[in-house]
Image (cartoon, helix red, strand yellow):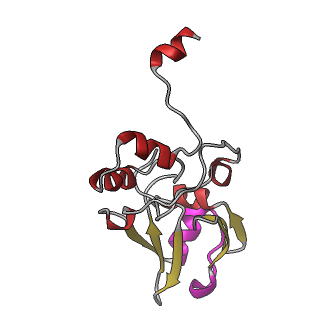
Amino acid sequence: YFAISSGQTENSEDVWGGEIPYLTAVASPGDSLAGGYQTSASFTPQELAQALGCTAGEGSQMVEILERTASGSVTRVRIGENEYDGGEVRTALGLRSANFSTAWDGEKIVFTVKGWGHGVGMSQAGADYLAQTGFTWQEILDWYYPGTTLSPAEDLLAG
C-alpha cells in the first residue's frame, strides 16, 4: 500500500520489475481530492545536476521525459546528457512520486508531482474515499487486489 495515487495505481512490473498478478493497475477514484495529491518542487539547472551527478544543460532543454507507464509514472527521463529511471529521480530529488511533469519557468525547472508513494497496491486515500462512499473493507480489498480471495486465518494455519 501507499499514500495517494495519481488517479490510477501501477502494475508491479512497471515499478519493481516483476509481475505479481494481484498487483495490477486499477482506477483509484477520489485520490485527486486528497490533501497533498499534487505538489511541486523547483530546481535550478545547477541544483538538478548536483543532485543527480550530471552536467547542467540549458534550463528549458535540460529535462525530457522519454517514457511513462500506462498509469502516468515516469520510467525513463533524460536530464542533461544522462538517462535515468523515474524512481531514481524521485529519490534523488525527494519527490513524492515518480508521476511528474516538468516545465521551465525562466529560472528553474518546476516538477509538478501527482500522488505520494510507489503507486503499487492499495492507495490509502483511495481506500478512504471508497469507504466514505459505502464500500465495505472486503470490497475495497477486492478493488485494489483483483483476483484475490480472503480466507480465514485458521484455514491458512491449518494447511
Q: Residue at x 46, y 87 (%)?
A: 105
- For the C terminus, which image quadrant? top right
Q: Which residue is drawn at 38% across and 69% down?
A: 39
The percent coordinates of residue 103 (x first, y second) are: 51, 83
The percent coordinates of residue 106 (x first, y second) are: 47, 90
Viewed as shown, does residue 117 lie left or right of 13?
Answer: left
Front residue of 157/54: it is 157
Front residue of 107/126: it is 126
Viewed as shown, does residue 83 lie left or right of 139?
Answer: right
Q: Is residue 24 above or below residue 78?
A: above
Q: Is the magenta stretch mostly helix, strand or loop?
A: helix
Front residue of 151/108: it is 151
Q: Is residue 141 above or below residue 29?
A: above
The percent coordinates of residue 76 (x first, y second) are: 68, 66
Q: Residue at x 44, y 48 (%)?
A: 2
Q: Please, which residue is most extreme toward the bottom here?
A: 106
The percent coordinates of residue 154 (x first, y second) are: 47, 13
- How many discs appear? 0
Quadrant housing residue 33: bottom left
Tell me where the magenta segment starts and ends, as one range.
Answer: 45-61
